[in-house]
Image (tube, rainbow, N blue to C red):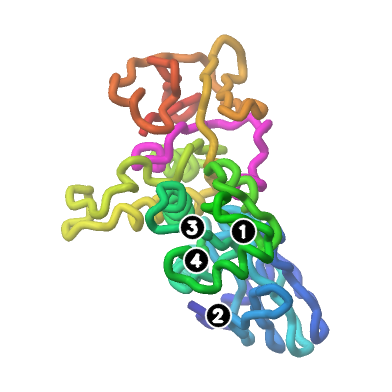
């Protein structure tokens, strides 16, 4: 998870960033900060800690040649940890956009970064080291929905069960929450959401903060199932500005399967969660963005740019295109969760125009 870069590799990175001297105790990143900077330690030591109330939980110490970051570096979402120098030294600081370019164009560094980012996120999920606590019961449909939403979006969280954990009542008293309010999501140790919707959770955790909803895109994909994620990967890898809209989580209905045995390239099968995560991270690697937690309400193509209106009434996101073609969608699509309600047709065009791909 913490590979050490060679001198030559650090020199290549330094050409795209700048060297920064740091004093002991200097904070490089605060928890909850939108991920925008990447650091490589060249001198001294840097520690990564996770605030837990008034205390801190040590996570790792980085030495010369090691670097910060996990998959939030790809998405631009908020980080979980505080990063600070514990000895005088120096770091190479690189902007996130420059890092994405390095990941895409330098195969050597790209492989190292992607592998480290993915393994670190897996470890965070396994240890429940996130910025959210879910309080509820395993017998509650609402609690199961929230846990599934966080799990399928690859967001680490801690879970407290009302039926088994004796310390839950102290936590409920601290945040002035009653039993009737559960399931409860405690967001970043400050915000308390009572039986929240998926959209409220996404907003509290800043899932979509890095996304400019008013920007006109080259390609808009509705539905982050296997087909939608494939369209995002192909479009973004060709240099298109891609936005994927998803009501729940990457993977679509396929992501809810326990295991997929008939997907091309995986003769021994693969878990649906792993397949969705791989496809999503691959799309992010090429710069595609994913907006989750909000249903798509309406598609319009009577004016340019073509517009996709979201259920919460937020400003439309637009897509470029020379013209707007329509095609029939199978009737079963309209009964699926997250399908565009009230529409029997969707926009479709090749990847050089507007395309809305069903799950």
- Confirm or deny contact between disc 4 and disc 3 (CB under 8 A): yes
Provide the residue designation for mark 2: 5
- Alpha-carbon distance for marks 3 and 2? 43 Å
At horizontal 82% and vertical 84% (from top left) the residue drawn is: 23
Tell whether label 1 touches label 4 (CB within 8 Å).
no
Q: Residue 160's mark? A: 4
Mark 3 and mark 2 lie on one chain; the one further toward the N terminus is: 2
Q: CA distance from mark 4 to mark 3?
A: 7 Å
Q: Where does the image place residue 316, in percent across and percent down from the top left?
A: 63, 26
> Considering only vertical position in the picture, is 314 above or below 246?
above
Q: Quadrant of residue 349?
A: top left
The answer to which quarter of the image holds residue 54 is bottom right
Q: Which residue is mark 1?
A: 186
Give the foreground label among 3 and 1.
3
**Marks 3 & 2, CB-CB < 8 Å contact:** no
Q: CA distance from mark 2 to mark 4?
A: 39 Å
Residue depicted at x 43% and y 69%:
164
On screen, residue 319 versus residue 237, left or right, reads right
């Amino acid at each position: 998870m913490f590979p050490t870069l060679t001198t030559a590799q650090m020199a290549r990175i330094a050409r795209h960033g700048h060297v920064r001297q740091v004093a002991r105790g200097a904070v490089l990143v605060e928890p909850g900060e939108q991920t925008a900077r990447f650091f490589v330690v060249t001198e001294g030591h840097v520690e990564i800690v996770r605030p837990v109330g008034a205390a801190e939980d040590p996570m790792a110490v980085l030495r010369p040649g090691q670097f910060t970051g996990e998959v939030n570096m790809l998405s631009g979402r908020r980080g979980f940890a505080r990063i600070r120098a514990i000895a005088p030294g120096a770091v190479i600081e690189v902007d996130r956009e420059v890092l994405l370019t390095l990941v895409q164009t330098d195969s050597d560094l790209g492989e190292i970064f992607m592998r480290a980012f993915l393994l670190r996120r897996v470890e965070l999920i396994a240890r429940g080291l996130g910025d959210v606590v879910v309080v509820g019961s395993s017998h509650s449909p609402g609690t199961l929905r929230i846990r599934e939403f966080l799990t399928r979006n690859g967001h680490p969280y801690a879970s407290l069960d009302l039926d088994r954990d004796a310390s839950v009542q102290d936590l409920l008293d601290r945040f002035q929450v009653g039993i009737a309010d559960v399931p409860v999501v405690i967001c970043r140790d400050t915000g308390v959401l009572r039986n929240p919707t998926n959209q409220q959770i996404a907003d509290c955790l800043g899932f979509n903060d890095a996304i400019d909803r008013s920007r006109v895109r080259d390609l808009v994909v509705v539905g982050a199932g296997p087909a939608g994620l494939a369209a995002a990967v192909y479009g973004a890898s060709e240099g298109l500005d891609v936005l994927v809209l998803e009501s729940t989580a990457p993977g679509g209905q396929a992501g809810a399967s326990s295991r997929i045995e008939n997907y091309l390239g995986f003769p021994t099968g693969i878990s649906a969660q792993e397949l969705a995560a791989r496809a999503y991270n691959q799309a992010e690697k090429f710069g595609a963005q994913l907006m989750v937690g909000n249903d798509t309400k309406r598609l319009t193509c009577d004016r340019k740019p073509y517009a996709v209106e979201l259920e919460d009434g937020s400003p439309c996101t637009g897509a470029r295109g020379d013209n707007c073609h329509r095609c029939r969608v199978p009737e079963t699509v309209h009964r699926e969760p997250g399908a565009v309600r009230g529409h029997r047709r969707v926009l479709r065009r090749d990847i050089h125009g507007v395309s809305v791909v069903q799950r």
